[in-house]
DNA sequence: CACCTGACCGTGT
DNA sequence: TACACGGCCAGGT
């Protein structure tokens, strides 16, 4: 595994998040076996702008807060994309966060 | 080559 | 409750 594969792994997981569900940076990092790399997951999302196949709006922070909304076009694009998928967002906060939370550790099989 | 800067998170005081 | 700290990855200056 070369070093640059980390972002790719992140994208691979994010791509599998079902519409209408969300997960967190930390959950992805943990799934990849590097629980301390949550920050790097965020950086991967920042770099994911070239990747239309990566639904970055489905990744929020551990509190269900849309911390990365400023990196989308406009002011509310991230929220609108989510609401478009049936996710209710209010004041940058995902409602029923725990309910629609998608944990790769549980939903996804160990590594892919 | 030595910093610096980010879509974060857990722990400690 | 609030802040400080270390760890993670990649690219820029």
Image (spheres, coloured by chain):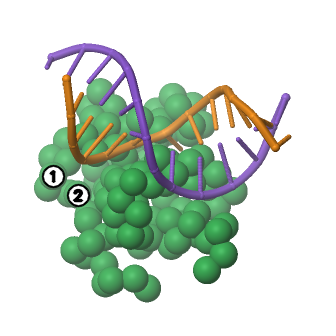
Chain colours: A green, B orange, C purple
Q: Residue at horizontal 57%, vertical 66%?
A: A6
A90, C4: nearer the viewer? C4
Local packing at callout 2 (Cα closer than 10 Å; few below 14, some 14-19, many 20+) is many
Residue A37, numbered label: none
Check the image and report above or below for A88 versus A112: above
Residue A32 at x, y percent in the picture = 41, 70
Q: Chain of mark 1?
A: A
Residues at circles 2 and 1 in contact by the CB criterion of under 8 Å: yes
Image quadrant in which the C terminus of chain A is located: bottom left
In this rendering, does residue A6 appear at all? Answer: yes
Res. A84 in view: no
Give x and y (percent) for residue A86.
29, 53
Q: Which residue is mark 2?
A: A101
Residue A76 in the image: x percent, y percent?
A: 46, 33
Q: Residue at x 64, y 51 (%)?
A: A47
Residue A93 vertical placement versus A104 (above, below): above
Q: Quadrant of residue A34?
A: bottom left
At 44% across and 55% down in the image, what residue appears?
A37
Chain under callout 2? A
Query: Percent from the top left, x then y, of residue A49?
Result: 64, 51
The residue beneath circle 1 is A98
């Amino acid at each position: 595994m070369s070093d640059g594969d980390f972002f790719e792994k992140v994208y691979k997981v994010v791509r599998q998040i079902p519409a209408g569900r969300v997960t967190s940076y930390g959950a992805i990092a943990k799934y990849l076996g590097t629980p301390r790399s949550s920050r790097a997951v965020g950086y991967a999302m920042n770099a994911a702008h070239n990747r239309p196949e990566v639904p970055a709006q489905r990744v929020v922070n551990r509190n269900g807060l849309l911390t990365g909304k400023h990196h989308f076009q406009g002011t509310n694009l991230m929220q609108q994309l989510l609401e478009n998928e049936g996710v209710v967002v209010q004041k940058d906060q995902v409602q029923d966060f725990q309910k629609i939370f998608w944990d790769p550790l549980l939903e996804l099989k160990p590594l892919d």
